[in-house]
Image: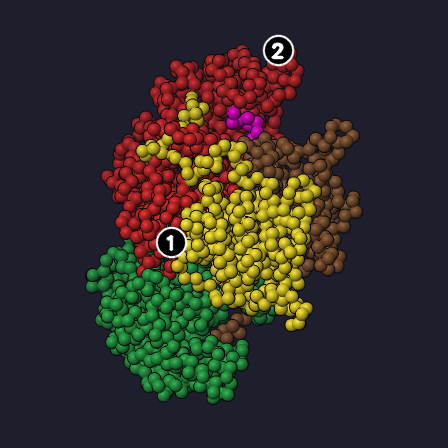
Chain colours: A green, B red, C brown, D yellow
Amino acid sequence: MAGGVDVSWLVGGPQGSGVESAAGIFAGACASMGYHVFGKREFYSNIKGEHSYFVVRASSSEIRSNVSGADVMVAYDAETMLRHYADVRGGTIIYDAAMEKAMIGDVATMDENYAARLGAELAAAGRPGGVEGAVAAAREAGTAVHAVSFRAILSSLADEAGNPKLRGMTRMFNVIGAALSMGALGVPRDVTLGAIRRAFAAKPEVARLNEMAASRAYSTAESELGGMRCALAPLGGPREGTMLAQGYHGTAIGKIAAGCRFQSYYPITPASDESVYLESHVELGVSGGRPGSTLVVQCEDEISAIGMAIGSSIAGARSSTCTSGPGFSLMAECLGWAGINEVPLVITLYQRSGPATGLPTRHGQDDLLFAVHAGHGEFPRIVYASGDVEESFYDTARCFNYADVYQVPVIHMMDKYLASTILTCSRFEPSRVSIDRGKLLTGRAGSDYRRFALGGDGISERARLGVEGAEFWCTGDEHDEAGHITEDPVMRVEMMRKRLSREGLALRAIPDAEQATLHGGGKIAIVSWGSTKGPILDALEEVRAGGGPEMRFVQVKMLHPFPTSYVAHLLEGATTIVDVEANYTGQLGALLARNLGREPDHYILKYTGRAMTSTELAGALRRVADGTAGEREVLTYGA
Amino acid sequence: MAGGVDVSWLVGGPQGSGVESAAGIFAGACASMGYHVFGKREFYSNIKGEHSYFVVRASSSEIRSNVSGADVMVAYDAETMLRHYADVRGGTIIYDAAMEKAMIGDVATMDENYAARLGAELAAAGRPGGVEGAVAAAREAGTAVHAVSFRAILSSLADEAGNPKLRGMTRMFNVIGAALSMGALGVPRDVTLGAIRRAFAAKPEVARLNEMAASRAYSTAESELGGMRCALAPLGGPREGTMLAQGYHGTAIGKIAAGCRFQSYYPITPASDESVYLESHVELGVSGGRPGSTLVVQCEDEISAIGMAIGSSIAGARSSTCTSGPGFSLMAECLGWAGINEVPLVITLYQRSGPATGLPTRHGQDDLLFAVHAGHGEFPRIVYASGDVEESFYDTARCFNYADVYQVPVIHMMDKYLASTILTCSRFEPSRVSIDRGKLLTGRAGSDYRRFALGGDGISERARLGVEGAEFWCTGDEHDEAGHITEDPVMRVEMMRKRLSREGLALRAIPDAEQATLHGGGKIAIVSWGSTKGPILDALEEVRAGGGPEMRFVQVKMLHPFPTSYVAHLLEGATTIVDVEANYTGQLGALLARNLGREPDHYILKYTGRAMTSTELAGALRRVADGTAGEREVLTYGA
Amino acid sequence: MAPRLADYKTGVHNDWCPGCGDFGILNAIQMSLAEMGVARHEAAIFSGIGCSGKTAHFVNVTGIHTLHGRVLPFAQGAALANPGMRIVAVGGDGDGLGIGAGHFVAAGRRNVNMAYIIFDNGVYGLTKGQASPTLKLGTKTKSLPSPNVNYNVNPVGLAVTSGFTFVARAYSYDVRQLKEVIKAAIAHEGLAFVDVLSPCPTYNDVNTRDWYAGEGTGGDGAERHSRIYRLEDTGYDPVVHFAGAAELDEKLGQALARSLEWGERIPTGVFYRNETVTPYGGRIRDQIRNYAENPPALQAIESGGRAITDVSPMLDDLRA
Amino acid sequence: MAPRLADYKTGVHNDWCPGCGDFGILNAIQMSLAEMGVARHEAAIFSGIGCSGKTAHFVNVTGIHTLHGRVLPFAQGAALANPGMRIVAVGGDGDGLGIGAGHFVAAGRRNVNMAYIIFDNGVYGLTKGQASPTLKLGTKTKSLPSPNVNYNVNPVGLAVTSGFTFVARAYSYDVRQLKEVIKAAIAHEGLAFVDVLSPCPTYNDVNTRDWYAGEGTGGDGAERHSRIYRLEDTGYDPVVHFAGAAELDEKLGQALARSLEWGERIPTGVFYRNETVTPYGGRIRDQIRNYAENPPALQAIESGGRAITDVSPMLDDLRA
Ligand SMILES: Cc1ncc(C[n+]2csc(CCOP(=O)(O)OP(=O)(O)O)c2C)c(N)n1
Ligand SMILES: Cc1ncc(C[n+]2csc(CCOP(=O)(O)OP(=O)(O)O)c2C)c(N)n1
Ligand code: SF4
Ligand code: SF4
Ligand SMILES: [Mg+2]
Ligand SMILES: [Mg+2]
């Protein structure tokens, strides 16, 4: 990124104070100026009041992750100041002057443990245990710190507009804070106002007021904040064919494009956003056909969600459900039913930190081995992971094809990191989405139709409900070709073979490039899966830019059945294997050991519930390169 | 077994016709004569009418499994005849003459697929497709076949007793059939009558009638059947300290002895027998204390069953639940809750053939990897498997100790094969059961009690409910030392380490001998787990007796955490590793590959739902020894 | 050609115990389909796990034998994806009111157009006779080691309370009424529930056929009377005609009151029927205008292997 | 020293939204424990998952914050293992009547001695305002993209039908009545249920505090009246005194009839109370004579690390 612009902007405040929309406005403005944007939200399992923050990075080069630290921070409350002041070393902090005197003890929402650590830290440096101490520390670290009275801006706005009611509209503090920082960063006023207008497009009156407030803040920024050390000048308008997407857009729009017409779900973070999106895009245009629709059903629990999706799939619709760990745990039994009955089904699994309720709004990749083994007994399945939002759009369509062609349940691994990012990426190309429904029978069947007929490649014709002459049976019991219960040992052996041989079939037929991807080259090989892709690619660049060695990155996309020989091929010649994952035990490492007989040499793991930054990952990779890394490198950056 | 007696006796008939009690009588008589007994029941998922059969083996030497084939068969119905005539090569068949003319098509319960195969087979040999054909085929194979009219015996009994009502008591056909065979085998009449008396001890009148019927049958046997080729003379009375146990007695009595005082369950085959046993032994004598009791609660589902057991464990009782695959699938989420809250809990998992409903009354060992990985997220657990009924008694107590000492959920792997066996074994010795409740706090707590206090060996004091000064909190969320919710990343890392380090702790502290057992020695090493132990030990003897090589057998008991180095040690010097399991994918093989980096060279697998016989296993082992075995040897013996 | 009863029977061997009440229900279902002239490919039976669950294999229309307690989710998913199918869900009392009770309550709220029949025998048949949720407190069947410690669930009451819009009870040995009730349930617009009292001669020696026939109601003489009586014979009107609050209260109230009758006199027939409530399929027509004509299962989603859904409006919304 | 209210409050920061009705319920629970003088170590709060689930951390007795929908199994297990504890289960309407409805129905049948309080706000609070099972059909809160497509469950009716022996409703802004109801629930011998109407100002903009206070009941003038009224003020008698069939019918019937009242007038107070039904703990005393004195959690099972249970009778039974 030599010579380019690369700004990390952090905004924080209590949940419900508009942190998310402020970040949306900032990201929107940057994207509209032609920047690459990558942002990620951190928040508590809480509705109002707990600390929430968003880091948005805008860069003139391609980026795929956050870095450690921030260049600019906008703090809406004392907690943001106290939690993040040290992240901004040498940058700029803008905070609401109203909190100037707040002490640690005043911040009721702050976790006891953090409060104790921070208190000790400030005390050790002889500083007051509150915002003042944080400000002093930040300044000493070279950070420019500006206290601005948000209320004063609102007041002058009210005066200007001759509308005293505006004085009370403190919910606009978020836009005021964002505009202050954007003004100071040199984002043209009309770009910011345009981003605000788009953000509140549904409510023009709200948009108008916020634009006014932002304009007032811009004036304050110009008069009081001076120029910042980094600037965000327009790069020449939005990049052609670029979208500003949220994490769940990939799978949600992917489902619509792939023809998923039934989604059942039970609300759960971070999975529900996808279903909510589908719920608000129910009716669909279809080229050359009648309008279509996605029926989205909110169920009484996740057992019902998967049960309904199976019922709908049997009826003939491409069907799916979307959940997170706790919900997926409840689905284990029905998953096996889909397996023994060869029902195509896509389960989108947005992982979060477990176990149990765990850290329900935080990131984790700790459900891999569970997804591979979930459900008693043995049955075929495909476990597939996307590395980023753009991939997830195309992968969603692939997952439905795999499900239909191999007549198996497919678990599509996503996670909270992906779900709660906002980023620029190339516009999805629906024309690249092919649809293969496999041996689906929708017309009249020949005589003697048997749903589970043996022979051939082991995959039999699958009738949907309602086809004349193709009545069929399904049962969770072992069954014969017609689908009726059997306990015959010979039939048992044939049916087990019929079903399980499908995994080998899939491995052979699915193109290598869909199973795993090689990025770069070098003797040190990183293996990973899922959302670590972004931090890894950025870290590899950083290592190289810092004079470190080239490394290769093998991204495994199909986790089950495991593409043993292709991954072995991609790892050929590697002297060091480094497993990177957001979990404690290194689950992909276990799959490597089991399938390749090769345990990774190093594990770089993070399980704080916060996603990796490319910075900390690059640090660990440098240690690997120079031989100082331990077997387990545990990353911990981020509040 | 050179020179000794070794008889396999098969009895079959429709479900509900008393096959089980006939087998009980036979087994009881043999045990009372001093024989070693091993028997196993096969039956359909059905209440009345489908084919059920029991093979009981009686031997003058120690035995631990069934062999292929039978020496004597008693057939109550045509289906038994048609399904098993070929099993009795050179032995004796006794069947009810009433079925003499039955054709395959008359047997409505017979599986279409088997009917077709059998029809073809008989036709190919030019025989009638029915009992007559089977009789002819059996005779040609050297089997003595006797048709006896069971009804005639009943009639003559009625005449003798002057009680015409007895004519209609066809439900005594089972005892008549058993007695006929026992008479012919030379079992002394009073031994048989004694066994009948014990079997019907609760109903003296029923016992009396059955004894009369048996006596009549004895006379018929003496007059019509002549001596059999094998004879079962008394060996000198029951062996000292020997029990005749059913499969579930090990874990059921084990739980009582270990102090399990709360068992919640939902009915499921083959797990419920254990709970039913506990339900009928609710009040307990306690040496030196007030009478105790096991509270057994039948729940609305398995989620409730594990939830209640957790609640009870938190209250302070040793608690457990018992289930099979489908129920265990439903428990995955709660299992993780127990994990993150460090709740001691024993889940007895009686496996059956999956997936889904699968073969609900048939055997399988296909839940191993699921047990190891069940539940989203990462948390500590112990997975422990018993090799036979006697072991299961002592292992049950161990499992409770592990749960209490390491404060983790323990999954005790059992299976349908174990559950539905009847066998002689040494009387359980409760004096060998030690109880270690670990850091359980029942007295008043010191000040500042914190349930999840960090430090030390990572295991903190666990208060039961109701202890003054030891109020505590639990949550499925990540928590601090007091048990309150936290999202602090630093606390998260400490708590993850606190919990997961426990697996290493258990591996180091639990004696090697409890983790794995070595039997025999040799260059060829068999690795296996659970109920294959019996067939393996018997097969090893058979191979050796037939001039084959000595082989060693490594029985892995602790499957998670995996005793990598101890198993590696036990495998040292082995040139060939053979994995033996009752599943399709070779799940222990996967654990070996993952943990030892060593994939087994051969897999001997069986997944027909029928347990291995030592005969077929010995055959496969011989092929391994002489180099003719394939990578996968799939066993299929048994109807 | 008008369908004949025989067309609705499969060749699968029925392995229920002799004398099992379930035979009556099976016959009534087959007769109902035949008399209603439902084409074989337009109907599907979904079933739970238990003796009763095997029903799906005995009726010669598509049969989906699901998991224990899960018949309602599976069946609703199919009914919603293709509302043109006639969906009949069946299962045991343990299946539907024990492990499946949560789905039961939720299904009532949803009112998807289909019928649900519970084979109510008071026991868990297939697992050897444990108490099911409908067995009365204190009852000791021969299969129980001690008297039942749980109060019984009231299936009719629960259905009415949960929002089922057709709620009936029948008796498996009164096949004539049973069949009429099942036909009405299948014809009903919305979710219909039929609780069928079905003796299990193998495990439930309390609520036997004889017991229902009047054993114990007063000697062997004339006072002895069948416990079962038909609501329709008493002039009972289960139908909600106008859906005013007062009428609703009355109709719900009478259904609940009758549902509590047990022992000496046990009512059968339709307890409650309300077609003034829009079924789920109708409720979603506000969101999906052509739902009935182009439901999820029948939509075209590709042409020549290419996706044909137009997602450009969504992508345009995200333009940077 | 008599316990004080402050003793029942933890220092854990309460992060509910300002104006959340749940604060009233939390206070009422703490006040009830204090007024009843329940020793801190003799009580435990079990909770489900949701905003309401956090309650377990705010009350200074042992608190077990379980899983979504599973509070009743956990709580019943503890109550059965140690019947000397005062167990109070709490949770959301989604938790208890959606995902947990099956356990709700089963718990009613079991009648374990404990209290269960539902925080009934009509929404799934913690997952951002989706419709909960108690939200009425067709209602569109601000958090829903389109009107609710499900009929509501009737918590009081469901509890009565399921066999709960104490069934009440209260309102979180009438803390006085609420507290009395909670005390009665805790004191009740058997399973007590309290449905607490609790406005969620963040997501449910339909059933707000103002709405309950009478908004929309007829102008701003005198005709406007609080929708909430107290059953006890109307001479309503919820208690089953004799347990004859006729009385039972009457008491159940009136409870169900009142449970259907909604909108203009919403009754609160105790709907039904029946202590003539033996609680589960009593039912098992037939099987375990010293259950109350020596319950599972308090039994001695070892001495000096050795098992002390006498299994020899069982082993003798198996002698070969
Ligand atoms: C998850 C799960 N738990 C338990 C079982 C075992 N099981 C099979 S049938 C059955 C009960 C059957 O009772 P009911 O539903 O009343 O049907 P019936 O046999 O009486 O017709 C049970 C518990 C199962 N199949 N799945
Ligand atoms: C198995 C499972 N599914 C989904 C969730 C996500 N979840 C958390 S709280 C909640 C709903 C809360 O609603 P309610 O029970 O009414 O409680 P409230 O927040 O309104 O008090 C859901 C669905 C979960 N934690 N576990
Ligand atoms: S056990 Fe009962 S319900 Fe099951 S088939 Fe036999 S009689 Fe019918
Ligand atoms: S979301 Fe609603 S229920 Fe939850 S804390 Fe806020 S106001 Fe209360
Ligand atoms: Mg039943
Ligand atoms: Mg709620």
- Compared across the picture, whether D308 is left or right of A436 comes to left
Mark 1 Cα within 10 Å, few/some/many (few <14, many 20+)?
Answer: many
Q: Quadrant of the C terminus of chain A?
A: bottom left
Residue B133: say if magenta: no
SS under mark 1: loop
Rendered view: D64 above or below A123: above
Name the spot of residue A25 as percent of width and height, x first.
44, 77
Residue drawn 50% across and 78% down? A200
Residue under mark 1: which chain is it in?
B
Let me know if residue D99 appears in the view.
no
Residue under mark 2: which chain is it in?
B
Q: Which residues are magenta?
A: B11-21
Residue that carries the numbered disc 2 in the rendered image: B160
Measured Cα–Cα span from mark 2 to mark 1? 77 Å
Name the spot of residue B188 as percent of width and height, x first.
47, 13
Label for residue B483? 1
SS under mark 2: helix
Residue drawn 57% across and 20% down? B206
Q: Nearer the viewer, residue D47 or A423?
A: D47
Let me know if residue B297 appears in the view.
yes
Q: What type is the residue that disc 2 sits on?
A: Glu
Rendered view: A572 above or below C59: below
- Compared across the picture, whether C74 is left or right of A536 comes to right
Name the spot of residue C268 as percent of width and height, x first.
72, 43
Rendered view: C237 above or below B168: below
Q: Quadrant of the N terminus of chain A?
A: bottom left
Of callouts 2 and 1, the N-terminal one: 2
Mark 2 Cα within 10 Å, few/some/many (few <14, many 20+)?
Answer: few
